[in-house]
Amino acid sequence: MKITFLETSDMHGYVAPTNYSDDQEQGFGTAKVAAKMKQLKNEATGPVVTIENGDFIQGSPLSYYIAKSQHPVAALTAPVNQLGVDVHVLGNHEFNYGLAYLKEAIASYRSPVLAANILNDAGEPYFGQAYTILEKEGIKIAVLGLVTQYIPHWEQPATIKGMTFQSIVETAKAYVPKLREVADIVVVSYHGGFEKDLTTGEPTELLTGENEGYQLLHEVSGIDALFTGHQHREIATKINGIPVVQPGFRGSFIGKIELTVATDQGHIRVVESEAALVPVADMAPDEETLALLAPITEELDTWLDQPLGKVVGDMRIVDPMGARIKEHPYIEFINRVQMAASGAHISGTALFNNEGKGFGSTITMRDVITNYIYPNTLAVVRVTGAELKEALEQTANYLAVADDTIIFNPAFIEPKPQYYNYDMYEGIDYTIDLRQPVGQRITSLRFEGKDVAMNQHLDIVINQYRAVGGGNYEMFSADKIIREIQVDMTELIADYLKAHPVIEATANQNFKVIG
């Protein structure tokens, strides 16, 4: 018998096949996934198990609008319920809108929601279920749900109060042997990825515990298949003979694993396995799925197209890399918004990806939300001059020189682009000299016309993700936060534009990058 597993992960609230910046149909989205999944289920010759591996309720203008409007989160999760998903796993971005919203989302799902390694004070799964056992045509299939343990480095402490995030390896070592005793097949669905090269075993990132997939498959025996996510990678392979998939993001692929099972001396065992990624781009979006959100989609378009302000000059981004090495008016604008909202005299922000187009002559909410893609709030941290310099040295590492050209360091593009971890500051004057050794590249650092003293105390406004050390910026931490601005950054941008309906596209070139 052949058992087919179908996985989605990191769909990030994309239902219709749109990136929301234009009218062109894109090759992703839950509606396309739904159409392809119907086809795959019809083609399957045996039982089918469907897994939703997390990061669904945050990430798109649609999910943002639902979270900030009067619509219940159930309106967003309805398309996933219609997929007929057997099991859900929490992702890290499920926490972004707070614990109450997360619990509301969990309650809206029709299938079990798993997170074995998030524990309460009693050492039990905080969200109720660690695993589920599905019975398909007489075969018992255990699904263990795991989540990246790194969430405390990104979320506000209040959101995760009373939770302990355990290593997935430690958790799996406890659960997998027990599940082998009660189930015929044991699979793991992990909202996390791989910390090492899948072939050589060489580390591909700092071994912080954010991703533990490689260690899991080398230290825990008894796993028949592994479903992953979080890194937005496209993976279909075998590691130690175990089939593994990771289906990209926004619903561009479905991860597919087929396990062929046979009965051997009364025991069911896997005799063959295959892993594949199934693209959905060629599918027409499922009309029933689109219909679920049609009324909200109309509201959303009206909301996105509302004008907020006008630009004098040019604030468009045509060269994302150029905007990182020479200050761009859009970056200066975001920093100015952060400084105005916080009262801080120094601000840091990033150009999160290479898809943002900046602002045209008229700024709409669509422009704001497709450029500033995360639901960040702000925090002001008090640090020393030495800690600020350390942060700048770290951000300098995201740049490199190749053939006399400044590029984004390839080490931070593969396996997952980390454009969001390269920060650009306003309120200080600094120079990054890439000719110098790592750790000595900040050759000039001045504040208010004077060299920054290493023991000097400075207040800096950054997003909350960075303020608690996100992106491995260990010089920042929650204990250095002196105040928080508990308003979503998108709203702060909109409010700033209401107060300043005409803005000038200027950049004071307060930082310089030398190659």
Image (spheres, rainbow, N blue to C red):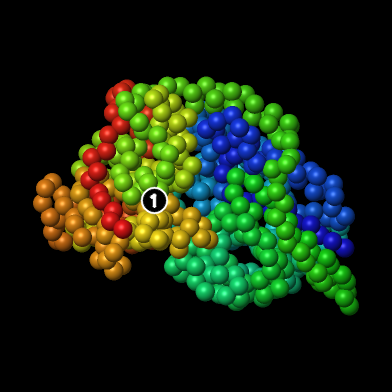
Which residue is painted at 59% across and 23% down in the image? 298
Q: Nearer the viewer, residue 105 or 343?
A: 343
Vertical placement of 185 versus 501: above or below? below
Q: Nearer the viewer, residue 80 or 449?
A: 449
Q: Nearer the viewer, residue 351 or 301?
A: 351
Left or right of 385? Residue 93 is right
Which quarter of the picture shows residue 189? bottom right
Q: Position of residue 86 (x, y in %)?
A: 72, 50
Which residue is painted at 42% across and 50% down in the image? 420
Secondary structure of the residue carrying tag 1 is helix
Q: Position of residue 137 (x, y in %)?
A: 86, 57
User: Can I make out residue 437 in this image?
Assistant: yes
**Amino acid under label 1?**
Tyr
Q: Nearer the viewer, residue 182 or 141?
A: 141
- Residue behind mark 1: 465
Quadrant assignment for the C terminus: bottom left
